[in-house]
Image (spheres, rainbow, N blue to C red):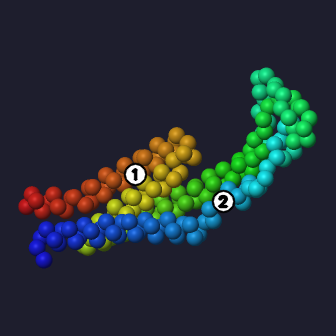
Amino acid sequence: MNTKQSLLTKWSLIIGIIIVLNLFFNYEASLVFNEPQYDQFCEQKQITEAVLTQAACVEVGGQWNSYPTPGIEKAPTGQSVSISGYCDPQFTCRQEFEAAQKTYDRNVFVTLVALGVLCIAISFILRGNDVISTALSFGGVLSLIIASIRYWSYADNILKVIILGVALLLLIIIALRKFKDRDETVRS
């Protein structure tokens, strides 16, 4: 096998390991943590009836939104009704779903970060095997990226700075460790 084919085979294997490793991590997380489903929190009815009053809206767990000027509509009974706003009947159940989703995403975030850091640490131990070491270090970094993307919208600004700082630090450490030996060999 010539050098070009060997290099192509090496990088194909590295990319394959990176992809499968992260698919494995994410599938494992989906088995360990039950992702909340919207219909578990908010019942999906085949036929829904309009909620026309604030009291009825609050009774079903909705949020009433007032119009600046009321209008008149026909109610299902055929009577004309003054409409002063509209109801979001799934307000409360959607809030509960979003809270459960946030908790789920946080748990997956912590898991993917831990697995990513573990992969990066193992890559330093296996420095003698370039393919495995490189694949694990890049796979770990990709796991950190995926975890951050999944949780980014929930994270506050301080956590975002910490995530970015840790990612930058890990990339610098990888660069120093991976290329230190090669730089010393080139100088010799």
Q: Which residue is mark 1?
A: 167
Instruction: Tell me the crowding category of disc 1: few under 14, some 14 to 19, or many 20 or more residues within 10 angstroms, Cα based.
Output: some
Taking the image as shown, residue 115 lies to the left or right of residue 95, namely: left
The answer to whether residue 133 is visible is no
Residue 42 location in percent, x, y? 74, 54
Instruction: Tell me the crowding category of disc 2: few under 14, some 14 to 19, or many 20 or more residues within 10 angstroms, Cα based.
Output: few
Which quadrant: the C terminus? bottom left
Point out which mark residue 37 bears: 2
Farthest-out residue, front: 78
Q: Are marks 2 and 1 in contact (CB under 8 Å)?
A: no
Is residue 184 depicted above or below 90 in this figure? below
Taking the image as shown, residue 120 lies to the left or right of residue 27, namely: left
Point out which mark residue 157 bears: none
Residue 44 lies in quadrant: bottom right
Say which element carries label 1. Answer: helix
Is residue 8 depicted above or below 85 in this figure? below
In front of the other: 170 or 17: 17
Farthest-out residue, top: 69
Separation of marks 2 and 1 at Cα, in angstroms: 31 Å
Farthest-out residue, left: 188
Name the residue rendered at 81%, 43% in the picture: 50
Residue 104 location in percent, x, y? 61, 58
Taking the image as shown, residue 147 lies to the left or right of residue 182, namely: right
Residue 60 location in percent, x, y? 84, 47
Instruction: Name the kind of residue labelled 2 in the image.
Output: Gln
